[in-house]
Structure formats: structure tokens, C-alpha cells
Image (tube, grey):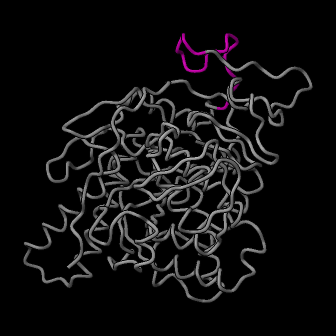
Amino acid sequence: MRNDPLLETPAPAGRPRMSRRQRKRLTIVIAATVASALVLTGGAIVFAYHQATDSIVRSDFTLPQVAEVAPDPGEQNVLIMGMDSRVDQNGNPLPDGVYEALHAGGADDGGYNANVLMLLHIPEDRSKTVGISIPRDDYVEISGAPLGVTHSKIKEAYGLAMQEKMNELSWGEEQLSDDELYQQARAAGRQAQIETVSHFLGDVRIDHFVEMTMGGFYHVAEAVAPVSVCLNQATEDSFSGANFEAGVQEIDVQQAMSFVRQRRDTGYDGPFLTDLDRSRRQQAFMISLTDKLQQKSTLMNPKTVWSLVDVTQKHVALDSEFDVLGFLKIAHQVSQTGAEFVTLPIVGFDNIGGADVNIVDVDEVQALVASILDGSYFEPAAPDGDLDGDPNDVGEPAAADGEDAGVDESADAAPEEATEEPAEPGTARYDSWEEPIRAGSIPCVN
């Protein structure tokens, strides 16, 4: 019998309030492209070896609140979901070595929360591709109110709807196998998660989804390790197994899992970390991972190739209409123009019903998303430098005549106090998770 979802993992208390400032200049790669990179490389390999996509889990979804659009709108909105479940897409346990690396229990731990949520917006002209990152603990309306829950963390829509569907099918008259029950329940989870995200963002159209398990992330890292990362300070954490020196270092797969899961420091004088710093860790790692996947030598190794094929088949789910080969062509076009990453703002933190949540201004979020989708978000700032109407904001100075803001290393550098210790060659230091990450170097993070 498969695991019942564990719907909540408490977030650490005592987190600082978050600034509402919107960044004018975005010069970073999409952090969550690890999932899309997996689909691009793994999907291509599957086609090349005639493995087809028959073994990849697929399911349908609808968006009843979104007005009908043409079958091929030209632009693409793809929702990337990273799950915290400790099983594969068929509900099977992972190898023991993976659980040891996770430092997070076994198959009965975890749940079916969508801990990574990103809407990848690819415009029709393939320019200004943007990844809209949605903080997993945003307190929002849950579409369909599964199990009677009308509002909760946005990541929990999946698990709530999945459990509701499992209850319904288990007590229904239709005779289903365990596999049929499990897959129908997961499809219900995806439907609720996608619909909840769409509604929260302003009833936006979502064309496709890509879902990846935690085990999938592990096996991708395993296939391409070692991966280079950089930390501003030495840190250790008995919960995640993290134990890192400061500076640039190459990490293996087990260290990679600790690196992306660490959200606290349990040492004597280590840095103060929160769940938001963990998100920044994941972004930094994904930038390095994506770069490694794009290196020709990575895919020249037959072992790496077959590992990625296996990952795609066991740990990725796609919607029924997702054309992997067609998406490869789109991805190639996007790679010529680059991509950027925006994190949705929150108002602050609170505790509701014993759970630490992010409080959001829905109108602000939807206005921001609308401006990204119609392109106005990228228009020059107002003359007074105000970015989002907040009188406390101070806009970034415009580049001088003849100065290329996209190349100026100081434009998006860390705060002035962080420049006292110069970063290592080939790196860029970031002391706050609020800072945008610039592509082209190894991000040094907390």
C-alpha cells in the first residue's frame, strides 16, 4: 500500500520580514531550469534511442476559469513543479542510497507538496523568456477546497486534492488496482495544483506542466557530478548533513542534496539561514547544474546519457499534450536569447493554524504577473526611479551614455559592504536572497 501524503513540513520560526522592492533589471538565468533542462536533455535522449514517451507518466488538466484560447497560442506557459515525495512517479520506493543522501527519512516520510513552483513564460517571439518563481509557503485560496480546505500554503494543493481523490476512489464502487488508484489520485493532485497556481496568478493560461520528484533531482545530480558551487561562509547542519567550507568547491551527489536542502546552521558561529536562503541555494545550484548539462562533454558519456533516460522515465510526469520534440525546438530558440527570473513578492510572514506562512498581496502579485506576460514589466522605469509605486523604493540609476548596463559588473553586485572581501575569480558574491543572480559566473551564496 502506498504512502498517505504528509501535507505539511513546518517552516522555521523567527524569519525576518521581506522587502517588497521590485527589481528593475533582471540579468539572471532561470533557476528552476533544472526541471526543464532535464526534460530537454532527457527527452531528446529518449527520442534518440527510440524509447518514446510511453513509459513517462502523463495526465490531463483543465482550467475552467480561463477563457478559451486558440489551440496554438504561439507563446507558451509551462508550470514546473518539483515534488517533495520520497518515491518515484509510480509510488515505488527509492534506492536506500538515495534516502541516506537525502537525510530526510525514507519512503514513508515527506508528502506530496509541490515545493518548487515556477511558471515558465515563453513569448511568441521567443524573447524575454521569464521564469516566475512562486514561494512555496504563500498563503492562498486552494481551488476546489479539497478536504474542505479553502486556504493554505500554495504548495499543499497537490497533496490535499490527491488525498481527497484517494479517499473517494477507495470507498467507491469501481474496482481499481493499486496502480490505477494511485495514478488517478496524483492526476487529481496535479489538476488542483495547476488550477490553484493559475487562479492565484490572475487566471493565467497554463499550456503544459513538467513535474519532477526529489529522487529525479538526485539522479540528475548523480549523472553530472561533480558540480561547482560557492559559499560565502563555512557552514554545517546536522539535519541536512551539510558540512561545507567557504569558497568555491566541487560537490558530489550526496553533498549536492545537503547543499540544496540546508535551511539552518547548527554550528557554533555559522550564518543565520532561513527557508528563503534554501531557495537561493537551490537557484545557485541549478545555475551550475544547467551549465554542466549544456556542456557537450556531459552528454558524450554513455553512462550519463542512460542515467538521464532512466530519470526521465521514472521521475518525470508531463501533460498528455506535451510534445517533447516540439519543445526542444522552442528551447533551442530560447537559448539564443536567454532567460530571466522573477520571484513573486510577499508582504511578510505569519503563523496561521500553527503553520508558518507567507502573507501575500494578491492584487500586487496579479498586477506584476500581468505586466510580465504583456511585456510592460520590462519597460524603462519612470523618471523619478520609482519601480512599483512604493515611495520607499529607490530606483537603480540609469546607465550613463555609452555604458552597457548588461555588462557592468557593479550594476547588480552585492551591497557595498559585501565588496570588502573580493570574490574569487569567476564568481559573483550575493549576500542576500533578494539579490538577482547574474549569469556567467558561479554564484557565491550564504
| Placement of the C terminus among the 4 image quadrants | top right
The picture places residue 37, in percent across and down from the top left corner, at 62, 64
Q: Nearer the viewer, residue 220 or 188?
A: 220
Reply above or below: 297 against 72.
Answer: below
Extreme-front residue of the structure: 268
Q: Judge left or right: residue 28 versus residue 234.
A: right
Q: Tell me if residue 165 comes above or below residue 17 in the rendering.
A: below
Q: Residue at x 71, y 42 (%)?
A: 438
Figure quadrant of the N terminus: bottom left
- Residue 289: x, y in percent? 65, 61
The vertical placement of 266 against 229, above or below, is above
Q: Which residues are magenta?
A: 378-393
Q: Is residue 202 left or right of residue 139?
A: right
Q: Main secondary structure of the magenta part?
A: loop
Residue at position x 55%, y 45% from top?
Answer: 280
Dividing the picture into quarters, in which one does residue 81 lie?
Answer: bottom left
Residue in the image at 19% along x and 65% along y: 165
Report the residue that reaches farthest toward the right. Answer: 402
- Residue 325 or 107: which is nearer the viewer? 107
Picture residue at 81% right of the left edge, 30% below the top: 405
The answer to if 387 sits in the magenta stretch is yes
User: Looking at the image, is 375 positioned above or below residue 302?
Assistant: above
Residue 230 falls within the magenta-colored stretch: no
Taking the view exactly as shown, the residue that stands out farthest to the bottom is 50
Q: Residue 168 location in percent, x, y?
A: 13, 67
Instruction: Give the image location of residue 179, x and y in percent.
Output: 27, 82
Total marks drawn?
A: 0
In the displayed structure, does residue 165 sit left or right of residue 288?
A: left
